[in-house]
């Protein structure tokens, strides 16, 4: 399978003025096409540095994709930089200048002389027409690989990638394989403990298994390369079955499923409703509980409640909201030593659990909410196990 690198261009990216969404989009499309992506790089608007980055990328990858820097202004240097990197001059294309003028005419505008710069591309490059913008794109084939330069505007880049670049790459590299990924979501289990149970699977070469930790949740990514989608799915299914065998109900969902969505499904299955109370969580629990089927409303208080006051307050919420279950969280944030009390009040009895989190306090509300929703999920699962 060929390999690729992405080079995003723009000083505004380095200054944090805009967020790079292009790399994310291209990476997913490359993955689906079976192209390995090992590196992404961001370079400011400097011809010499861009040219050096392109030359270096061509020593490592078969495909180098750049985005940005194809506009008409002085600080749009990609055309010159790519030409320098591959050792050819820029070449004026009268037909491109004509297309640019027609595009402006459609907008009821006249192009300025600097727009003429956009009709220059590296000598010998293949023009990629841009019917959704004014900046032509191009592809330059070299003995080391191909450099494809796309506009930085996401809408234009996505259109050109799907309608021209991807078909070109499939033909150019005779792409037949695919790379598929599936993400399993776990809750209530630290990353280190999870690693202890599945570390041997993380050493697989194909499919690969990797972990991604979030506050109160760890994702397990399974990625498979194969000649067909069916073969890749079969490889993933085998590893997923083993993960589910080892982890059981620690896995709450996959891919686009959310913890609150899964909890809502269980609530509907049992015909249950619940109310919620949060103390010191900043609205996070109520916001996410609002997405759960069966949620009957809740209350937010600013000051944390101790292990006695939290369930007492929940008991007061149950009859008021006419819900048999009540879920509560009380957060005590502290740098490196966050503590949360989670309480669940049911007709069967009260339960109060204490959890600790060593991350920054800003992440504590999300962590505490995940712990609370997961406790609710586990108790709903227990109902299904009861004869």
Image (cartoon, rainbow, N blue to C red):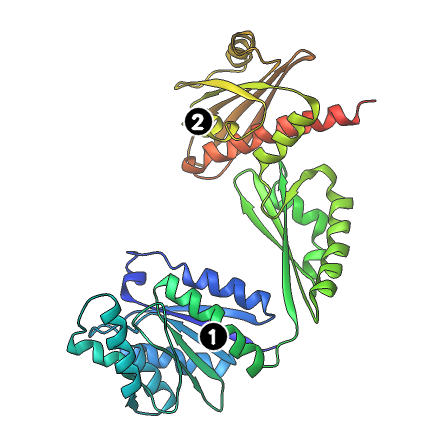
Coordinates of residue 277 in the picture (x, y in percent): 49, 19
Q: Quadrant of the C terminus?
A: top right
Front position in the image: 345 or 320 = 320
Coordinates of residue 128 in the picture (x, y in percent): 40, 79
- As drawn, is 368 to the left or to the right of 120? right
User: Quadrant of residue 17 in the image?
Assistant: bottom left
- Which residue is found at the position 20% from the left and 73% from the top? 73
User: Quadrant of residue 48 in the image?
Assistant: bottom left
- As drawn, is 76 to the left or to the right of 320? left
User: Quadrant of residue 84 in the image?
Assistant: bottom left
Element type at mark 2 = loop
Element type at mark 1 = helix
Image mark for residue 216: none
- Which residue is found at the position 36% from the left and 86% from the top? 85
Front position in the image: 210 or 66 = 66
- Which residue is found at the position 56% from the left and 12% from the top? 311
Q: Quadrant of the N terminus?
A: bottom right
Name the front one of labels 1 and 2: 1
Name above or below for residue 131 compared with residue 299.
Answer: below
Residue occupied by mark 1: 164
The residue carrying pointer 2 sits among few (fewer than 14), some (14 to 19) or many (20 or more) residues within 10 Å by Cα, namely many
Coordinates of residue 267 in the picture (x, y in percent): 65, 25
Real-space Cα separation, disc 1 to disc 2, in angstroms: 48 Å
- Which residue is found at the position 55% from the left and 33% from the top? 370
Residue occupied by mark 2: 281
């Amino acid at each position: 399978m060929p390999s690729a690198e992405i080079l995003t261009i723009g000083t505004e990216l380095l200054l944090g003025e805009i967020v790079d969404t292009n790399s994310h989009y291209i990476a997913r499309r490359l993955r689906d096409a079976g192209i390995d992506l090992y590196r992404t790089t961001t370079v400011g608007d400097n011809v010499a540095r861009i040219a050096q980055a392109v030359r270096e990328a061509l020593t490592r990858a078969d495909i180098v994709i750049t985005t940005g820097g194809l506009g008409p202004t002085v600080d749009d240097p990609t055309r010159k930089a790519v030409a320098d990197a591959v050792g050819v001059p820029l070449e004026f294309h009268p037909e491109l200048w004509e297309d640019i003028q027609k595009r402006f005419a459609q907008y009821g505008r006249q192009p300025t002389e600097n727009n003429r710069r956009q009709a220059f591309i590296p000598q010998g490059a293949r023009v990629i027409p841009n019917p959704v913008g004014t900046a032509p794109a191009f592809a330059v084939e070299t003995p080391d690989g191909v450099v494809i330069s796309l506009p930085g505007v996401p809408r234009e880049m996505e259109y050109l990638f799907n309608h021209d670049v991807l078909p070109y790459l499939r033909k150019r590299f005779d792409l037949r394989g695919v790379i598929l990924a599936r993400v399993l979501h776990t809750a209530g289990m630290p990353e280190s403990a999870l690693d202890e149970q599945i570390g041997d699977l993380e050493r697989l070469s194909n499919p690969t298994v990797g972990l991604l930790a979030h506050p109160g949740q760890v994702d397990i990514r399974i990625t498979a390369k194969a000649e067909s989608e069916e073969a890749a799915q079969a490889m993933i299914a085998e590893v997923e079955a083993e993960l589910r065998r080892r982890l059981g109900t620690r896995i709450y969902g996959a891919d686009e499923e959310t913890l609150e969505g899964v909890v809502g499904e269980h609530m509907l299955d049992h015909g249950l409703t619940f109310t919620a109370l949060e103390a010191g969580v900043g609205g996070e629990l109520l916001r996410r509980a609002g997405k759960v089927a069966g949620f009957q409303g809740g209350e937010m208080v600013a000051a944390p409640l101790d292990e006695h006051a939290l369930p007492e307050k929940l008991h007061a919420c149950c009859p008021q909201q006419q819900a048999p279950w009540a879920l509560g969280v009380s957060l005590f944030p502290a740098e490196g030593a966050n503590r949360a009390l989670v309480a669940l009040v049911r007709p069967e009895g009260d339960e109060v659990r204490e959890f600790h989190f060593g991350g920054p306090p800003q992440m504590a509300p999300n962590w505490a909410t995940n712990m609370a929703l997961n406790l609710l999920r586990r108790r709903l699962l227990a109902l299904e196990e009861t004869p």
